[in-house]
Amino acid sequence: MREMHTGVAIREALTLAMEQDERVFLAGEGIGTSIHDNPLMPTYGLLEKFGSKRVKDTPVSEAAIAGLAVGASNMGLLPVVEIMFFPFMTLASDMVVNHAAKLRYLSGGKSAFPLTVRVKAGLFPAGCQHCHNLEAWMAHVPGLKMTFASNPADAKGLLLSAIFDPDPVIVVEDMGLYFMLGEAPEGDVRVPLGKARIARQGTDATVVAYGGAVHTAMAAAGMLEAEGVSLEVIDLRTLVPLDKETVLESLGRTGRLVTVHDATRFCGYGAELAAIAAEEGFASLKAPVRRVAAPNTPAPFTPPQVEYYKPGAEDVVEAVRSIL
Amino acid sequence: MATAGDAGIRLQILEKMILSRRFEDQITELAEEQGRLPGMQILATGQEAAVAAVLALQDDDVIVTNHRSHAHILARGADPNTLMAEIMGKESGVNHGKSGTLHLIVPEVNVLMTSTVVGAAPPLAAGAAFAQQYTESGAITAVFFGDGAAAEGSVHEAMNLAGVWKLPLLFICENNCWAGAQSYQEHCSVGNIASRAGSYGMPGDLVNGNDADDVLKTARDLAARCREGKGPALMELATYRMHGHGEFDKQHYVDPEELKEWAARDPLTMYRKRLTEEGVATAEQIESMEQEAARIVEEAVRFAEESPYPAPEAVLDHVWAEARATR
């Protein structure tokens, strides 16, 4: 298979979707003409390719961007809008939470909102108003689906599935991965929503992760392998709907569970996984569930604090050791 | 103003105003009888001239409305039976009892969306208008919001986007002088909402919102402009909220003299009188409209009361396009 950067793989998904369906359009701040003149960014060059009718640079206006997606999707288009950074979802959240997620329900099933919101996540040196992983907030809202890819193939395949899914999907893109090389298939190869991937098979403990944290988990697995400990790593790929079966089956095989994410710990997505393990996988558990996550502080700016804040492979190794 | 050729549409406006008033008076009666209606009921009593704005549109145009929507939706020709059933939370309701009175959504008559989050309708409507522009459908979207909603940032974002992209979007602000228990003077820093239009590169017209002919003429002119691709427009209807923010709200904060003054300018009374004086409608015709409205509403209440509630477990339906939600 070919190798490409995740940012380019995302662009390939956008390009394929736009080529095959006129209903697909893109809108967002700087998605056409960007201050970032970088060919690894997902929407680079799409304005030139598809024109300003289909690639819409918007005012700095998150409520309007998200409202645009809700209204246009209800009229039969397939909007793919971008919210520049995850914390800015708070500005778009009325449209996403109270409208995209709820209007089908309120209509008694008469209305449809097949929209996609791409949102950039991850730590970069801009401080906590630009860096804040809010996936647990979004996952708590019935009516939204959410993907969080860890590699180019999934980023491409999940985005294609999201665009053509009949429900609103939040597609979280870990910015650090834009610049990461990996394999990605050619053509319209989709990754189904709600299906996790076993990134590495193992027998002693299960580590569940998503997005960039999958790489943290994989690094920990490599470190532990040297010590003779075999980790199974599950890459969730989709947070809503959650592939509970794959998690519980793996827990059934290994008897131990560690969750890893870059978001803060308290009420984070790992808490839901731990609760599922306690409710439905209790008989398999040979030890307490451990959660590896960021501390309960806003994201830091200064490099040594970023290092301290972001969960690393050593943190995973330590968590696994504590339950072996 | 109205022309001789407008007799047909003016009669329709009167008919829909009569139906809306009768429909909502019935809700007032039911709301007073404990237990007959679940939840709160928010009415447009006194604001029925807005019906003329709906009738100024074409059938393929879309409307996006808000919590005070009964008159808009009835003017669009939605079925009063399923509307009343929805208001009572019944399975036969237009939204299977999921909405109640507050978010009635009737896509079959192009009442595309209804939001009860104050100020949320304009961004949604911008999306609908964008889709009309994108598909070159030739249709437009009209969005209704109140003077209270005009304080929300989302309304300004929607107006700015519509102005920049020249969306076929008619903003209709029904300024009924109240936002909850706060008067217009207390929540708005300028004399009128229409004057904001200039900030977004669109025309803004202030009309007498209790005069259906004024509303019809302005809505027609502005809708035509939107349809011609000249971009959005804003019209403000100066009107008055005769009931509170919900039927439970007895308006203890309102000066009774003010209510009396506005009651003297009741849009329905004025229009009935004018059409009779101008010979557009006879007293017999109007009497027959009143009787027909009473019959329709009586039938709607019967239909709604005889309809069962949805099954409790249907609470899990309609979250997703496919598959039921989990408990």
Image (tube, rainbow, N blue to C red):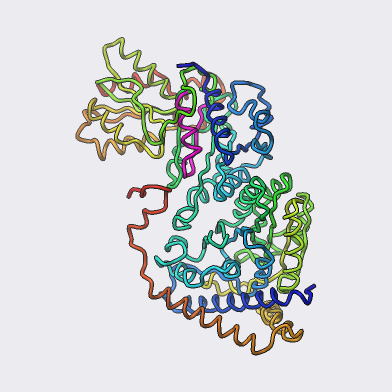
Left or right of A302 on screen, residue B219: right
B152 left or right of B219?
left
Q: In this view, does A43 lie above or below B107?
A: above
At x 66%, y 37%, the residue is A56
Magenta range: A153-174
User: Percent from the top left, x then y, of residue A264?
Assistant: 44, 32
Quadrant into which the C terminus of chain A falls: top left
Relative image position of residue A204 (x, y in whole percent): 25, 21
Nearer to me, B61 or A182? B61
- Left or right of B156, for residue B100: left
Q: Return the x and y of residue A240 as percentages of the image width and height.
A: 41, 39
User: Residue A151 magenta-drawn?
Assistant: no
Q: Return the residue found at the far top.
A: A226
Return the x and y of residue B37 as percentages of the image width and height. 44, 72
Above or below, B64 against B209 in this view is above
Q: Please tell me which residue is depicted at 33% across the width and 20% down the height of the picture.
A: A200
**Residue closer to the observer: A258 or B37:** B37
Please report the residue visible at 39 percent of the width from the left and 47 percent of the height from the top: B322
| Residue A61 is at least partly visible in this image | yes
**Is residue A86 visible to the viewer in this orientation of the structure?**
no
Marks counted in the figure total 0
Residue furthest to the left in view is: A283
